[in-house]
Amino acid sequence: MLIVVAGAVAIQVGLGAGAFAALDGSSTKGSAGPQACTTRPNPDAPEAGEERGCFSVDATVDHALAVGETAGVRFVVSAQIAAKGVRVEADLPANLAWVDPPVGLTLSSHPSPNPVHLGGINRAGTVRSFKAGQSVTYTGRIVAKAAGPAEVKVRAAADLRAGVDAAEDLIPLTVGAAPGMSSFGAQRSTDADSVEVSPDVTPQESTPHLTAESLSPAGLAAPAGDDPPAPRALAAAAAPTACATGKWLYVDEKGVTRPVVNMTVEAWDADTSNAHDRLASGLTGTKGEYKLCFDNAESNNSGQDVYVKLTTTNKNWRVQATGTTNAFTFNTPTVSNVANGSTTSFGDRKPGAADRMRALHAFDALNDAWKWVPGNTCWDGLDTTCRQVVLNWAPDSTVGNYYGNKQIHLKADAPDSHMTVVHELTHAIMGDVYEDNAPPIPNCSPHGVSAKSSTGCAWVEGFAEWVPASVYKDPYYRWPSGASMNLETPSWSTSGWDDGDAVEGRVAGALIDLTDTTNEGSDVYGEAAPGNVWNTFLRHRSTTFAEFWQQRRADGYDTSANGPLKSLYQSTIDY
C-alpha cells in the first residue's frame, strides 16, 4: 500500500511471502531469527517492494520471435539458504516449445486448464538441492509454433511445513505470424471480441457460500445517439421495442468457467454512416445473465443493428488497463435489423483472447469481496457517498502488487490468485474507512508473514490477510507463484515464526481463529465473519491489534479470558 498523507512521506505496503523458515530445518523454535528469508523474487521487483522469500529467479529471452523462429532463454536461480527438494521449472505455453532445453533439466508436457497456457505446458524442470547463497545459471533455446500471446514463466519452489516457498519470473511475449510482427509484452488494446461458450458448460461461482448481491443500475449511462429522427408516422405511433439477452462468463486459472456479476452491459446500434448509438444499459445478474430492452425504431424503418458491449466497471469498482483510465470492454457480434418485439439471444460468451481472462478474474474477485462485506451500499458501510475502488492491471504488467495513490496495482499473473486481489482490495477499503489517514507502519518495507515487523505493520497486513481467508474460507494464503502459507495452524511451537502481535501472520491467525468454527489447541471460540470484527473496524481507526482489541471491548463485544482470548493465545498473542 502506498500511502501519502497530505503530500508527505509515502509508505508502500503490500503482501510479501518473506521470512519463511529455513528449508533445511535448522531454524530455531518460535523465531524466524537469522534464517528469515529476505530475497526479492526477481530483479523486476522494486527494491522497496514487500515480496520476499528464500529464492530469486531472473529470466530473459534474447529477442521476440515469430512463428518458426528460435530464441535463447537464460535464467538464474538463487537460494538464500541451504535447501533440499527445490523444484526448478521453466514453463512454456502450447505455442512455444523447447528446441534445446537447459542442461540438467528434463522435458515434459502437461495439460493445463489455465487459458494463458493455450491448453498445455511444455516444461523443462528438475528437482535439486541448493547451498546457502548458491546461484545456478541455465540456458536453452525455444521455438515459436503459433502466433499470439505467450508467457515464459520460470519458477523455483520448495515445500515447507506450513506451505510452499516460491519465486518466479514471467516474460510476456507476442508471437508474430511473420518476422517483424513480434514484440515483448502483450497487446495493450482494451477493446476485445468475445466467443461463445458451449451450452454444456455449467458455470460455477467461486464463493457459493456467500449470498449473491446485485448492485443498483442507478447512474448508468442513458441511451444516446446521433441518428436522424424517425419518420413522422412512426414517431406518432407507439415506439417499437426489442430486447437482447445473454450471459457473460470467464475461465479462471484452474479451467473453471465462472459468471461475471455486476459488470456493466450495454446494447448498441452499429451505424455505418454515423457514430454507434447506445440503446440501453444495465448490469449482469448474479449468474452473469443480462436482458436489455430498447427503442427499436430506425430512421429507415428497419430494426436496429444490435451488438452488446460489456465493460469492467460499475459504481463500486473498476478494472482498468495499467497506465490508462480505460476499462476493458468486450463485444459480441452484430445482429442486423432485429425485428420489432423480438428478443435476440447472444448466448453464453467469454473473452476471445486468453490473456484477457485475468481482467475478469480480478473483477470477479472484487465481487466476491463485495458479497462478503456487509451493508450492500459502500465498501465503507458508514459512508453516504461511495468511493469506487480502482484496480490497474494489464496482461504484461510488471507493476504491483500494491495499493497506492488510492488505487490497486497488480502484476500480469496476480489475478491467478484471487487472494492477492482481495488482499490489496482490503488495503483500499482500510484507506476508505480511515479517510486516507494511514496508521504508522514502521519496519514494514519489506515485511514477511511470519516475521516480526511492528505492531502497526502487523495490524495493517494481518487484517488484509484475514479478509481473503474469510471470504474464501481458506486459512492458507496463496500467491500467484504457487507459494502458500498456512495462517491458522502455526502456534507457540512452530519453527520459523516470531511470536506476538508485531507479527502479521499472528494477527491474521488470531482473527481467523476468532471468526471460524475450526478449533484447535487453545482456540475454543468462534463467531461469524465479518460480524463483530468488521463492526469495530468500521467504527474506529485502529492502529494496532492491541488498540483494536480495546475498541472491541468498548463496543461491547466478547473479550473474555475463557473465550476470545484463547483464540488469540493460540496465535501467540497473550493479552
Image (cartoon, rainbow, N blue to C red):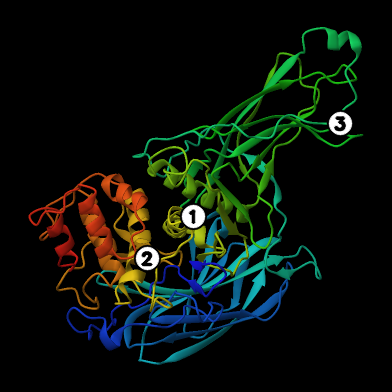
Return the disc, 2 or 1, that comes first in the chain's sequence: 1
Q: CA distance from mark 3 to mark 2?
A: 51 Å
Q: Is residue 503 left or right of residue 196?
A: left
Q: Dot 1: few (<14), some (14–19), or many (≥20) neighbours within 10 Å?
A: many
What residue sits right under mark 1 in the picture?
253
Label 2, label 1: how far apart the Cα atoms are: 26 Å
Name the secondary structure under disc 3: loop
- What residue sits 85% from the left and 21% below the top? 298
Answer with mark 3 or mark 2, whichever residue precedes in sequence.
Answer: 3
Three-letter amino acid code at the position of disc 3: Asp
Q: Mark 2 belongs to which amino acid? A: Glu
Nearest to viewer (mark 2 / mark 1): 2
Give the quadrant of residue 547.
Answer: bottom left
Label 2 sits on residue = 461
Q: How far across and down, in percent of the image, does residue 422 sit?
A: 44, 55
Give residue 381's position: percent from left, percent from top. 42, 43
Which numbered circle lies on residue 226?
3
Q: Quadrant of the C terminus?
A: bottom left
User: Residues at badges 1 and 3 in contact (C-beta under 8 Å)?
Assistant: no
Number of numbered discs overlaid on the protein picture: 3
Image position, residue 402 (x, y; %): 50, 66
Which of the pair 292/352 is nearer the observer? 292
Secondary-structure class at tag 1: loop
Graded by Cα atoms within 10 Å as few (under 14), some (14 to 19) or many (20 or more), the crowding at tag 3 reads: few
Q: Residue furthest left?
A: 562
On screen, 232 above or below 144? above
Residue 118 is at least partly visible in this image:
no
Q: Secondary structure at mark 2?
A: helix
* Disc number placed over residue 471 in the picture, else none: none
